[in-house]
Structure formats: structure tokens, C-alpha cells
Image (tube, rainbow, N blue to C red):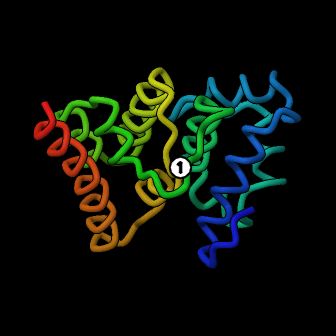
């Protein structure tokens, strides 16, 4: 686990490490990968949640299902601390319009669009810091949520602008 004082950062590092471990059962990882927002999760998710997620996970169950599914999709190379979601999307060539739809979305639409972005990054083997995705889903305060959006957009456009200068 990370030595970060942020409990969410420690949880995300633990979840990513667990799901990426060679000792994590491949059948269970596959079941977690298949989870879809709005659908009941497999029994494996509950076992995983009870063992590895914060005690309050049920309050944000749909978001934790999405986070577990996304990390499982990218495992074993899912989590790269310090390399934000916006940076990974920019480096991968993700479109501006898709990022805009993701950042403007809510609820199950946001969860679905995040999983699509994760599949895009997984196909390009672009791990990122899952703390960004966790904050994107779990932040409820509108001002803090807007800060998360700006952070992701800033990283994205920093990369996009650098790519334009070198092209």
C-alpha cells in the first residue's frame, strides 16, 4: 500500500495492487471486468468489496463497482501513480468531444463513459493514476467536482498542446 496520507489514495493503490496481483484468481478478475453500470454485480464483487473496500463502500456502490471493473479491465498494468487520467487520455489520442461528454455526464452515463475511456486506454496499454477516476466518480461537492474536471482537462490539454508543437 502507498504511504500517502490520503485514505482514498491508499485504498485505490491497495485495490489496484490486489486486482493486478498474479495471485488474484483470474476467473474472479474476469467476472469483475464484465461488470456493467446499472446491472447487479456478481457475488465475487461483494466478497472483494467486503475484503478490500472502505467500510462505507455501500453508500457509493455503483461507483465502486465501476472502479473495480475498470481496474480489473486494465490489470495487470492498471495503476501508475502520478500519471493522471487526463495525461493518459491526451497521450493516447482520446478525442476532445469524448472527454467533454465524460466530464459533463452524471450517474450511470458517467460510469459507462468512464469504462469506455478505460477500455480505450487498456487497448493502448496506457495505465494511469486511478485516484483521478475515483475522484471523478466519488466527489459529490460541486466545487470540488469542478476542480477534478479542471485537473483532468488541464493535463489533457497540456499533452495535446505539446503534441501539436512537436508535430
Horizontal and vertical percent position of residue 7: 64, 72
Residue nearest the observer in this picture, 14 or 163 = 163
Residue drawn where x is 80% and y is 28% of the image: 28
Residue drawn where x is 80% and y is 34% of the image: 43
Horizontal and vertical percent position of residue 164: 12, 37
Residue drawn where x is 29% and y is 68% of the image: 147
Q: What element carries label 1?
A: helix
Residue 12 located left or right of residue 136: right
Residue nearest the observer in this picture, 114 or 74 = 74
Residue 111 located left or right of residue 94: right
- Quarter containing the N terminus: bottom right
- Local crowd size for mark 1, using a 10 Å CA cut-off: few (<14), some (14–19), many (≥20): many
- Quarter containing the C terminus: top left
Horizontal and vertical percent position of residue 25: 86, 29
Seen as rendered, the residue at the extreme bottom is 5
Q: How many marks on residues?
A: 1
Horizontal and vertical percent position of residue 57: 66, 59
Q: Mark 1 points at which residue?
A: 63
Residue 46 located left or right of residue 144: right
Seen as rendered, the residue at the extreme front is 166
Q: Dividing the picture into quarters, in which one does residue 47 lie?
A: top right
Residue nearest the observer in this picture, 18 or 43 = 18
Residue 10 located left or right of residue 110: right
Residue drawn where x is 18% and y is 44% of the image: 162
Amino acid at each position: 500500500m502507498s504511504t500517502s496520507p490520503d485514505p482514498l489514495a491508499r485504498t485505490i493503490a491497495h485495490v489496484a495492487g490486489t486486482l493486478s496481483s498474479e495471485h488474484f484468481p483470474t476467473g474472479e478478475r474476469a467476472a469483475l471486468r464484465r461488470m456493467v453500470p446499472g446491472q447487479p454485480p456478481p457475488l465475487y464483487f461483494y466478497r472483494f468489496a467486503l475484503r478490500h473496500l472502505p467500510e462505507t463502500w455501500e453508500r457509493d456502490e455503483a461507483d465502486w463497482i465501476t472502479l473495480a471493473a475498470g481496474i480489473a479491465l486494465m490489470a495487470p498494468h492498471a495503476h501508475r501513480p502520478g500519471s493522471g487520467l487526463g495525461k493518459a487520455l491526451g497521450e493516447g489520442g482520446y478525442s476532445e468531444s469524448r472527454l467533454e461528454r465524460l466530464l459533463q455526464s452524471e450517474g450511470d452515463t458517467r460510469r459507462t463513459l468512464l469504462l469506455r475511456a478505460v477500455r480505450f486506454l487498456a487497448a493502448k496499454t496506457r495505465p494511469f493514476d486511478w485516484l483521478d477516476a475515483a475522484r471523478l466518480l466519488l466527489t459529490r461537492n460541486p466545487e470540488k467536482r469542478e476542480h477534478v474536471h479542471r485537473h483532468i482537462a488541464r493535463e489533457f490539454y497540456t499533452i495535446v498542446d505539446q503534441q501539436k508543437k512537436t508535430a
